[in-house]
Image (cartoon, rainbow, N blue to C red):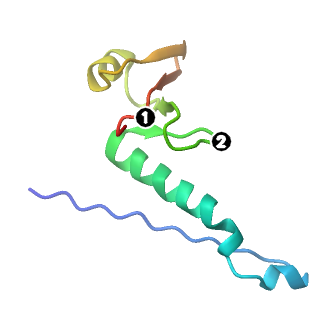
Amino acid sequence: MARHSRAVGCIRRSGNRPESQEPVWPYRLEILRVIDSLKLTDHHSVATPVNWKDGQDCVVLPSISTEDARAKFPKGVTEIRPYLRTTPQPNR
C-alpha cells in the first residue's frame, strides 16, 4: 500500500511599515530550512533545533523510545536527558 503524505506551510508577514511590502526573497534561506526540516521530520522521525543548518545533529522525536531510536539510527544516539536525544542527520 502506497503512503501519501504532503507538507503544507504558509509564511505570512504583516505590518503597516513600507518594508513589510518587500518580497519574501530576503527570507529564502529560512524558507528552505523549514522545508528541509519538515522533510526530515516526515521521513526520518527527527526534529531540528532552532538555527539548525543542514548537516548538523537532529533531535530524536520523544515518541520513539531510546531502544527503538538506537535500532533506527545506526550512526548513534546521544542521550542528553531521557526525553532529549540527538543523532547525526539521518539522510547524510
**Above or below for 54 versus 72:** below
Choose the circle earlier in sequence order: 2 or 1.
2
Horizontal placement of 85 versus 30: left or right? left
| Dot 2 amino acid type | Val
- Say if 5 sits above or below 15 in the image: above
Q: Where residue 46 sits: x, y (%)?
A: 43, 37
Mark 2 and mark 1 residues within 8 Å of each other at the beta carbon: no
Distance CA(mark 2)–CA(mark 1):
15 Å
Residue bearing mark 2 = 50
Say which amino acid is labelled 1: Gln
**Residue 48 spot, x, y in % from top left:** 54, 40
Q: Nearer the viewer, mark 2 or mark 1?
A: 1
Element assignment for label 2: loop
Image point (65%, 42%), residue name: 50
Residue farthest left in this picture: 1
Task: Say which mark, if any, is on residue 16.
Answer: none
10 Å crowding of disc 1: few (<14), some (14-19), many (20+): some
Residue 55 x %, y %: 49, 38
Q: Nearer the viewer, residue 51 or 8?
A: 51
Residue at 41% from the left image edge and 31% from the top image edge: 63
- Whether residue 68 is visible here, answered yes or no, is yes
Tell me if mark 2 has few (under 14), some (14-19) or many (20+) residues whose alpha carbon lies within 10 angstroms of its own: few
Q: In this view of the protein, which residue sits in the foreground, 66 or 27?
A: 27
Residue designated by label 1: 89
